[in-house]
Image (cartoon, rainbow, N blue to C red):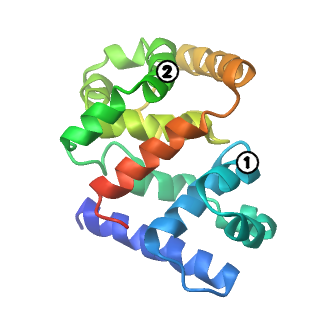
Amino acid sequence: MDWSRKRMQVVEAITDRVSAATNRVISQDLAVRIAVCCALRNPEEALTYMTNRSTCEMIKEHVDELRISIFEFGQFFGFNALPAHGSDQCVQLAGSDCVRAVTDVVETALRYALAEQLQSANWRKPLCRLSSVIAMEMEETSEALGLAVGTFGESDARRLSDAREHMEEEVGTNLEAVDLALNELLRAFGIG
């Protein structure tokens, strides 16, 4: 089975789950957006930023059941699931200031892993860097980044944890970068 089909199965499962929880028909892009928001460190703040107030109110009680799972994240945003090339817009976004602020932190923390052939090849993909922006803000950062970039060692994981703490203290949740990355990934995958 190809990755685009696996990705669409995940999208359909998420859409069904969100629609059932809200008793409404929810579009695929909004359902994925909600599932990602629910998996971030501060889901209520993310939902408020990336959706409207009524959607946020509907979802607040269902955050735990609606969050994108690590398995779903890997099927949707994982390095195996990403196309080799993104659009020109994707390349531009991956280099934008707010996205670059996050990817620079990831690149520094994972410097040993990114020296490996597979991880280095993945990191050169703009879609991988955009996925890492989302992964950095998730509760399960290490697991999500491992799926977005490829495996990494214990020393990289410790640096990543320290970098995430520092980022959280300095800027909190970088919702602008997550929103930009998510919008572009959804567009690149033809969802929405």
- Residue displayed at 61% across by 75% down: 18
Q: Indicate the quadrant where residue 99 lies.
A: top left
Q: Which mark is residue 126?
A: none
- Residue displayed at 49% across by 35% down: 133
> x%, y% of residue 67?
64, 60
CB within 8 Å, label 1 to label 2 = no
- Residue displayed at 31% across by 51% down: 81
| Mark 2 nearby-residue class (10 Å; few <14, some 14–19, many ≥20) | some
Q: Is residue 98 left or right of residue 129?
A: right
> x%, y% of residue 162?
67, 16
Q: Tag 2: residue type?
A: Ala
State whether residue 178 appears in this view.
Answer: yes
Q: Tag 1: residue type?
A: Glu
The residue sitting at the front extreme is 53
Which quadrant: the C terminus? bottom left
Q: Indicate the quadrant where residue 84 lies.
A: top left
Q: Nearer the viewer, residue 125 or 31?
A: 31
Q: Is residue 112 left or right of residue 70?
A: left
Q: Which mark is residue 45?
A: 1
What residue sits right under mark 2 in the picture? 101
Distance in Å between CA atoms under marks 1 and 2: 20 Å
- Residue displayed at 43% across by 23% down: 97
Q: Earlier in the sequence, mark 1 or mark 2?
A: 1
Label 1 sits on a secondary structure element that is helix
> x%, y% of residue 10?
44, 68
